[in-house]
Amino acid sequence: MPTGTSSSPLVGRSAELATLREAYANARDGSGGVVVVGGEAGIGKTRLVAEFLAEVGDGDGAPLVLRGQCADSGSGPLPFAALTGVLADVVDALGPEAALAAAGPAADALGVLAPRLVTVRRDVDSGRLPEVLADLVTALAAERPLVVVLEDLHWSDDVTRTVLARLARSAPRTTLLVVATYRSDDVGRRHPLRTTLAELDRARLVTRVDLPRLGDADATLLLTALVTAREPAGGRAAAVPGPVLVQLVERTEGVPFYAEELADFAGAAMPDSLRDLLLLRYSSLSDTARTFCRAVAAAGHRAPHELLTAMLGPAGLDDAEDAAREAVEAHVLVADADGYRFRHALMQEAVAAELLPGEARRLHAACAGALEAGERTLPRIAAAADHWWRARVPDKALAAAVEVVTAAEPDGATSTAVAAGERALELWDLVPDAEQVVGLHRAAVLRHVSETLLDAVQVDRADALAREAVAEWPADDPAGRAMALSTLAHILGKAGDPGSDDVLDEALALLPADDHGGRATLLRLKTRNAMMDHRDDEAIVAADRALEAAAAAGDERNASLVHNLRAMSRLNSGDIDALEELERSHELAGDDWRAQCHYYTNASDVWLKLGRFEKAERLAETGARIARTLGAGWATRAMVEGNVAEAWIGLGRWADAEGWYERSVPLIDPSDYAVYLGERWAWLTMWRGDVETAQARTRAQRSAWVRYGRMEEQIRARVASTLAELALLRDDLDDALDLIPIALDRESLSPHYRLTVLAVAARVLDRARRAGREVDVAPYREALASCAVWPTFPTWAALFAAELGDGSWEAVVAADGPAHLRPYALYRDGASLLEAGDRAAARERLDAAVEAADAIGCGLVADQARALLDGAGLARGATRARQPDRALTDRERQVLALVAEGLTNGQIAERLFISRKTASVHVSAILRKLGVSSRTEAAVLAREARS
């Protein structure tokens, strides 16, 4: 990236540049931060950052600037590309020894990025790279102002996004400013960058700068300035005719890059496509310069001297110096300390497409050979795999791709592994004797790829490949086939397929008696299936067998995982002493991140069930932080992060929870994870007051939820409760009555889940009695008594009694339970008092219900309490008159602020990463709660409240 300004003026970006200036001023004062600049390709992101760097780089006290650029290898993100650039700048600024000293004792992890700086030992924990690099940057920011620029995050890998998140959390207490850019048109709904940015938005750790297209006036100013600046030497350029200028402005469509490219051709025939436009400057170069540019384009996003030497030879590179200078002076290439890159990524793509077939194969093969000749780090292997593929050398491309798949997991590069795995399968049939080339048979590769896809929560694709692996497994390898079946069984369990147990039994029958490690894995999966289905006795028996096998194999990972599952089965039966075994699983996990993540997921889940939401949140946050730091795939992170969101529900942080579900659930393919999280999202949506959306969501998902519930008690319990609550809200008493009998089945549900269903069942039974239905309450009372072993029994028993009129609502108000119970109990108590004719006490209770509900964003209760107050003609006090937005949830206040700025529903949806329909629902709720009829009135009230 250039350190100076471009030859083009910066037009129409004063507000965005001011934002960067302000962020840097804050950073210099010790309040650093992150600014993320987004916009479509060619919109001027790099140009804006270059202008900013030129400003802050002038004069005394200039900051240290570290720059990195993400890149696409062609088959997925190039691992660590941006981080390598950042580390290189650190070394350039400090020197190798000082850089290593600043990194501290964990500097070995940097060898993943710079093998020549630090020798990569086999025992180095590369998963610590995000922590080490982020800590190094933060330490440097303690000594002087520091600006870190990360470009093209749309090509970022998992680890780069983790480093960005860590820096964002460290920056506010330092003189560090992080400026990141990404192409918004390359970040779709499922792009992982959306999740990272949404997390930072929610935590208020990022300032977003979205670059729009220039208006006609600014585009005209830019084009006029560009044409004037590029007048021929010794003469003056003629004024651009009006019709030509109008045509140029139209063709640019407000994109500054198009304007820069078109400016040289004012008055000439216009190119018919962007590709032709991008190639115009390139085409004006000499033959030698174009040859050099094609070599740079073949190398990828940038061409370091190492690769150029391999492609051109040492003598050829020396001879190409004049050609390189010509390309740089023509603004086609940009030179940096160690090579060249194109001025714009789109130009690199266009020039690469100009390569002749033979030329492309030769250049890509040279790049691949050079990459494989050095240290075999994951980024180099991934880049080599892509170059071999582009060189049309399928055997080498296949070997490298398979190496990426098998090597990526320890480095946490899930996205890279998925892309490489799919490429390997694509190449397999093109390579004669493929098994000899890669050292694995195709079925083994299929199994590796299916496991990678499962970690990326692409369950359907993982299922298909796992079945293919089993079908193709060599008949003379029963042990291998058994493990392929174990992978299939694991995937089936995640897909809610009850056939998982049968597949595991088939695998166990194939496994040799002395294969203790394989047996431990298979028995662990049987333990999991039984535990999830509340077959606790069966789970404990399988766990004991699995622990024997793990001990015989010396397999601590499986031992940890099995102790975890065994403890969960004991706890599900009401054995609270099993918490000790759960901690034992943590001890055995050691540094194994999968075992650790399983511990944090299940341990936080236990404390959620025990109603200890603060402790659950701390455990889940710790697990989520470890998962992100170590580069865990989304499948591992989704559940532990989901437990954080569920803890927020219990604590009353409903806006935070809603934000997490909104940005996370749509990213998850159909799986048990999608059901867990989708059901909680629907429940939260209902209690937030958006009943219509919750009803629609459950109608669409009900059949899938019921299917998954056949295998997992958590799903069947929660689905029954949520569907019954929604049935009551639409007055479908028959459906509600059909759903609640599951609470009577001790074989189907553990005490905790029976208690939560019984609480809803009591409400349904009370509604039925009021409707004149004959219902038998006695079995439900007996079921409640059988759950007394569970520690939260007093809370749910109080709610059960109050719903049926056997107990007081005051007891529920005073109970220690999830945040929504208090406003709900206040509302129900107020309703009872109103029905009894005690209007004064009812108003007090209902006002308290509104206040408590509004405090957490419980719109369902707040709306119901207000409706009772309005219907009874009871005043609600002066609070609302003084603070018109007090009745709004946190998210609704965010939406109201954007309404006040004049944003449309579509713009609000984009700003908050929500759907247009959700934005519309929020606006409608705001108008209703504020008692106004238009967006304008709502905006006026918001401004008055702020003043």
Image (tube, rainbow, N blue to C red):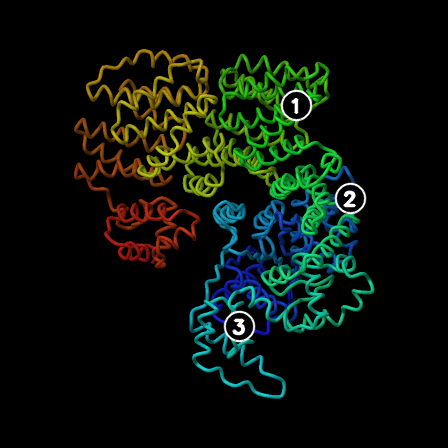
Q: Calculate the distance from the C-alpha at mark 1 to the C-alpha at mark 2.
A: 35 Å
Residue 58 appearing in the image: no
Return the mark for residue 481. 1
| Lateral position of residue 424 relative to residue 606, left or right | right
Up-down: is 770 above or below 20?
above
| Lateral position of residue 72 relative to residue 875, left or right | right
Q: Are marks 3 and 2 in contact (CB under 8 Å)?
A: no
| Lateral position of residue 334 relative to residue 527, left or right | right
Disc nearer the start of the sequence (1/2): 2
Q: Calculate the distance from the C-alpha at mark 1 to the C-alpha at mark 3.
A: 61 Å
Circle 2 is placed at which residue position? 120
The number of callouts visible is 3
Crowding near pointer 3: few (<14 within 10 Å), some, many (20+)? Answer: many
Up-down: is 644 above or below 534?
below
Q: Calculate the distance from the C-alpha at mark 3 to the C-alpha at mark 2.
A: 48 Å
Residue 298 locus on image (x, y percent): 68, 58
Name of the residue lying farthest toward the bottom: 235
- Quarter the N terminus occupies: bottom right
Name the residue rendered at 18%, 37% in the picture: 871
Up-down: is 250 above or below 931?
below
* Secondary structure of the residue carrying numbered label 3: helix
- The three-letter code of the residue at mark 1 reads Arg
Residue 934 locus on image (x, y percent): 25, 54
User: 475 or 835, which is in the foreground?
Assistant: 475
Circle 3 is placed at which residue position? 262
Name the residue rendered at 75%, 35% in the picture: 436
- The three-letter code of the residue at mark 2 reads Val
